[in-house]
Image (cartoon, rainbow, N blue to C red):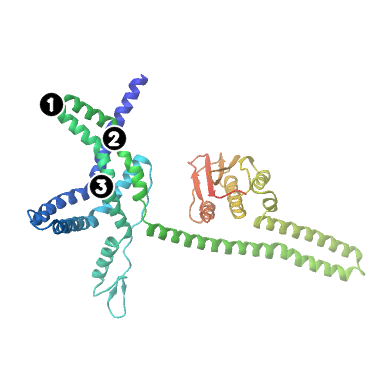
């Protein structure tokens, strides 16, 4: 049964390999289908000019060199003419194949048409030039965005490289199969050898898409730079908003809490000062109230400080700070740690407050009865996973606490992963690259 199952799996791999090879051949052959006929016809025409010439060999060599350059020029023009109309679609199909077959996600972004603007002179500006009508301006904006896109030219580079790498490798199993079938009747040994080679190579030939696609199918450098700039701009805006909100929270906490208690403390002590001679008992009561207010103000200041920068985090580090969170929680929390040393202070604080937010969500929103926190460090990445047995359905909706955790991690190049089906359980992982001390 095991041998039969292995044979079936191998047969399925061979069939899938031939199909995927055929798809790759179709996606990478257009440039070759254009270049080869044009090159053949151009060579037949150009090299005929110097054929039979009786000139000295240096002149003949110079003539052949010029004819070769002319053929290359014709081929380049032909390929360049086809490229704007085929590269984007073919590269997009290759990316989808890489995602389905290899799990290789290669997200790219193409340039969008610019907004057209009506000028005071009555002309329309498309970002590049002026036009008499809005329709013409929009058309030219679309043309410019499509045909002057760095990502489109990157797709053309992919097709050129794939024509000399992916195409021949992916075509080998198919060629071996076809040639073997043709040669079996007349030359059985050679035909059988080619058929065997086609069978053996079929599961592997198409995998050339992985290394070549990973290098050439992704976003071009200018696009990656644009994405990074946009990401940094978003992170800067988020940090500005977060800082403003934190300052507002601190100001509100001081104004409504400690400041009010200190004002009441001053008023009580002033009243006690006037009553100490005439009514000592009342003065004692006021002083007792003042002492209670001072204790309350001190407690509120300590709570405010803990919310800004918990002392246990500063003195003992992330692991002990998370354990302190677990001890203060209203539900049972299990903490497992595999972090051998302390990370950098900013990363440590960001991860601590992220874990605190996740723990609060588990208790407040998911109504969990048991929570697990796991801290680990591997491959220069510090990871915290918070799991609970709550109601599930957690999502990083804009403006939510999970969205705040995502933005906090993005500031350090980290990530947020949520696995929370309806009904639970929920498992949320935050990970940030860092070095330990």
Badge 2 is on which residue? 17
Q: Nearer the viewer, residue 74 or 119?
A: 74
Q: Nearer the viewer, residue 428 or 220?
A: 220
**Mark 2 to mark 1 CA distance (whole Å):** 27 Å
Q: Residue furthest bottom?
A: 121
Badge 3 is on which residue? 163
The answer to whether mark 2 and mark 3 are in CB contact below 8 A is no
Q: Say which element carries label 2.
A: helix
Residue 333 at x, y percent in the picture: 63, 40
**Mark 1 to mark 3 CA distance (whole Å):** 33 Å
Badge 1 is on which residue? 186
Sooner in the amino-acid sequence: mark 1 or mark 3: 3
Task: Give residue 137's quadrant in the image.
Answer: bottom left
Q: Say which element carries label 1.
A: loop
Residue 252 at x, y percent in the picture: 65, 64
Residue at (64, 41) in percent of width and height: 331
The answer to whether mark 1 and mark 3 are in CB contact below 8 A is no
Residue 144 at x, y percent in the picture: 28, 65
Marks 2, 1: nearer the viewer? 1
Q: Say which element carries label 3.
A: helix
Horizontal side of 284 relative to 71 (left or right) equals right
Sooner in the amino-acid sequence: mark 2 or mark 3: 2
Residue 303 at x, y percent in the picture: 70, 56
Task: Tell me the crowding category of disc 3: few under 14, some 14 to 19, or many 20 or more residues within 10 angstroms, Cα based.
Answer: many
Position of 163 relative to 61 (above/below): above
Q: Nearer the viewer, residue 181 or 302?
A: 181
Q: Residue furthest top?
A: 1
Sooner in the amino-acid sequence: mark 2 or mark 1: 2
Task: Give residue 261's quadrant in the image.
Answer: bottom right
**Mark 2 to mark 3 CA distance (whole Å):** 19 Å
- Numbered mark located on residue 11 in the image: none
Residue at (31, 25) in percent of width and height: 8
């Amino acid at each position: 049964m095991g041998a039969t199952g292995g044979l079936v799996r191998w047969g399925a791999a061979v069939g899938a390999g031939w199909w995927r090879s055929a798809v790759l051949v179709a996606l990478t052959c257009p440039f070759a289908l254009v270049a080869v006929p044009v090159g053949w016809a151009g060579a037949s025409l150009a090299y005929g000019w110097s054929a039979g010439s009786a000139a000295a060999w240096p002149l003949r060599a110079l003539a052949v060199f010029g004819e070769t350059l002319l053929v290359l020029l014709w081929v380049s023009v032909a390929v360049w003419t086809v490229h704007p109309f085929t590269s984007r679609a073919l590269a997009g199909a290759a990316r989808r194949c890489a995602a389905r077959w290899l799990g290789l996600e290669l997200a790219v972004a193409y340039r969008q048409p610019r907004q057209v603007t009506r000028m005071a002179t009555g002309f329309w500006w498309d970002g590049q030039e002026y036009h008499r009508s809005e329709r013409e301006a929009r058309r030219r904006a679309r043309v410019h965005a499509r045909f002057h896109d760095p990502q489109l030219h990157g797709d053309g580079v992919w097709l050129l490289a794939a024509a000399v790498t992916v195409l021949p490798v992916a075509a080998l199993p198919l060629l071996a199969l076809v040639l073997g079938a043709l040669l079996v009747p007349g030359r059985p040994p050679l035909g059988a050898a080619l058929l065997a080679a086609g069978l053996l190579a079929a599961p592997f030939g198409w995998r050339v898409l992985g290394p070549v696609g990973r290098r050439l199918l992704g976003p071009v450098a200018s696009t990656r730079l644009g994405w990074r700039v946009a990401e940094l701009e978003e992170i800067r805006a988020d940090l500005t908003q977060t800082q403003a909100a934190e300052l507002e929270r601190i100001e509100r906490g001081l104004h409504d809490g400690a400041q009010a208690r200190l004002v009441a403390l001053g008023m009580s002590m002033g009243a006690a000062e006037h009553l100490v001679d005439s009514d000592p008992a009342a003065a004692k009561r006021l002083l007792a109230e003042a002492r209670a207010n001072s204790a309350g103000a001190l407690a509120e200041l300590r709570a405010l400080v803990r919310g800004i920068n918990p002392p246990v985090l500063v003195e003992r580090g992330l692991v002990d700070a998370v354990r302190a969170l677990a001890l203060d929680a209203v539900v049972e929390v299990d903490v497992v740690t595999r972090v051998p040393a302390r990370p950098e202070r900013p990363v440590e604080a960001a991860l601590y407050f992220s874990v605190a937010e996740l723990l609060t969500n588990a208790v407040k929103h998911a109504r969990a009865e048991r929570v697990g926190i796991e801290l680990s460090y591997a491959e220069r990445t510090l990871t915290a996973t918070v799991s609970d047995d709550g109601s599930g359905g957690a999502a990083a909706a804009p403006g939510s606490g999970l969205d705040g955790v995502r933005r906090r991690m993005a500031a350090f190049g980290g990530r947020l992963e949520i696995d929370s089906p309806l009904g639970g359980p929920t498992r949320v992982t935050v990970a940030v690259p860092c070095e330990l001390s």
